[in-house]
Image (tube, grey):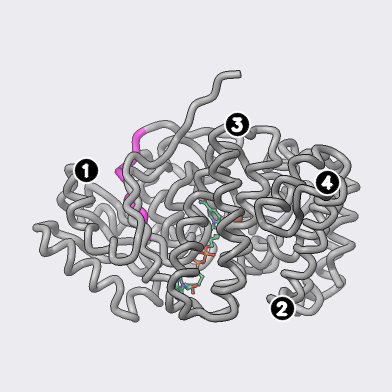
Amino acid sequence: MTYSVSVPPRLVIGGGSLDSIGEVVSGLGASRPLVVTDGFLAGNGVADRVKDILASAGLAAEVFSGTVPDPTSVSLDAGVAAVKDHDADAVIGLGGGSPIDTAKALAVLSVRGGSMHDLKAPVKYDGPALPVIAVPTTAGTGSEATQVTVITDTETDEKMMCAGPSYLPKAAVVDHELTHSMPRRLTADTGIDAMTHAVEAYVSKQRQGFSDAMALQALATIGTSLRRCVENGTDVEARAAMMEAATFAGIAFSNSSVALVHAMSRPIGGHFHVAHGMANAMLFPAVTEFSLGMDDDRYAACARALGVAGASETDADAARLLVDFLKQVSADFDVPTPESFGIDRDEWFAKIPLMAQQAIASGSPANNPRVPSAEEIEAIYAKIYS
Ligand SMILES: NC(=O)c1ccc[n+]([C@@H]2O[C@H](COP(=O)([O-])OP(=O)(O)OC[C@H]3O[C@@H](n4cnc5c(N)ncnc54)[C@H](O)[C@@H]3O)[C@@H](O)[C@H]2O)c1
Ligand SMILES: [Fe+2]
């Protein structure tokens, strides 16, 4: 087997690394970056701080703060205009996955034109784009290290996965100090997203040696640090560890793939506006349980990396312990069901056939160890409702 590895050419990781953003951007030959962020980071002073650091490095930066959570195709129009108004030669995604994904989409659309609808999976875009520099503030989507952007089609509510080398950031500055302000719910949801990336990358049919190594390293760290971050947001050591793990998990799935959890969570986010990590969390135990029986050695290795099974358990027992652990995490982190989240039962069940169809169309279920039929996907959606 041959495989290739894609990682941002430059990753600066660690507390205080934000101070290097000017040097990182100028090192790419850019002089007019647009900082793409959201209202929260524009309001709490972080975007201004970034602009000041860039100015000190002699760069003419502007800020676009019009990102919406789970970015929509319509929300990109103002961003494309901002890139053109500023005559930007680079785009900095500052924030959680939403601003970073918005920055990636703007980098492509402002050069290529057209719409993200033309670029949804299975298209792999490798055409021209502005350079993207990612500065994550959640730990997290791993978007700072992936060749993926996720944009919701405003007309259909479909969460479209768009992938290809042109979305891979040219650099990322991964400073855990930016995550210390995350409240408990966001810490839990984004941390579960990172854990899902690592597990899905490791069990995916697209896995390879490099993604395996990144996934297992991420899981070992998540096993010791996620709960600490959720229980005590001021635990700096755990915050630093989780931030690095989220980036590693992003590298893992970007070089392998996600699988059935993400396939099914995107439609939940698109139709019912459940935060991405929370939608994953709603599905993770049930999808893992469904997937057992195939590649149990892989699920067992995930359980052992997370520290919830040892060498003495058989692979089947260790894989089962992973499911128990995921159920416990959901309970301890107060992950709601769709019902307790407030989604109307009739609306949920009416949308199940469409959600199953969109899950399959994304291509991700084909990477799952057990490849589900449409009926099996529908049954999982029905099962997790309450
Ligand atoms: N491209 C990829 O590889 C990839 C991978 C996974 C998820 N995603 C996408 O990322 C998006 C989700 O990103 P997310 O979960 O990071 O959340 P987000 O970017 O949508 O942010 C959620 C909320 O948290 C706030 N926030 C961000 N950082 C904060 C901080 N440090 N302190 C306090 N509040 C903060 C934001 O302002 C926002 O209100 C989804 O659209 C999802 O589909 C992309
Ligand atoms: Fe994700």
Looking at marks 4 and 1 on the same chain, the residue that comes earlier in the sequence is marked by 1
Q: Mark 2 to mark 1: distance in Å?
A: 43 Å
Residue depth check, mark 1 versus mark 3: number of the one nearer the observer:
3
> For the residues marked 2 and 4, what is the alpha-carbon distance in whole angstroms?
24 Å
Q: Which is nearer the eye, 194 or 31? A: 194
**What is the distance, in whole Å, between disc 3 and disc 2 at their CAs?**
34 Å
* Between discs 1 and 3, the one toward the N terminus: 1
Magenta residues? 128-135
Mark 1 surroundings within 10 Å by alpha-carbon count, few (fewer than 14), some (14 through 19), many (20 or more): some
Mark 4 near mark 3, Cβ–Cβ under 8 Å?
no
Task: Give the residue drawn at x 72%, y 77%.
Answer: 332
Name which residue type carries label 3.
Gln
Q: Which mark is residue 208?
A: 3
Can residue 6 be found in the magenta stretch?
no
**Horizontal arrangement in the rendering, residue 371 relative to residue 364 (left or right):** right
Q: Secondary structure at mark 2?
A: loop
**Going by the picture, which residue comes out furthest to the front?**
312
Q: Is residue 19 above or below residue 251?
A: below
Name which residue type carries label 2: Asp
Identify the residue under disc 1. 28
Q: Quadrant of the C terminus?
A: bottom right
Question: Label for residue 59?
Answer: none
Whichever of labels 2 and 1 marks the residue nearer the N terminus, that label is 1
Query: How far from the left and from the top, in percent, is residue 243?
Result: 46, 61
Q: Which residue is mark 4?
A: 291
Return the residue at label 2.
334
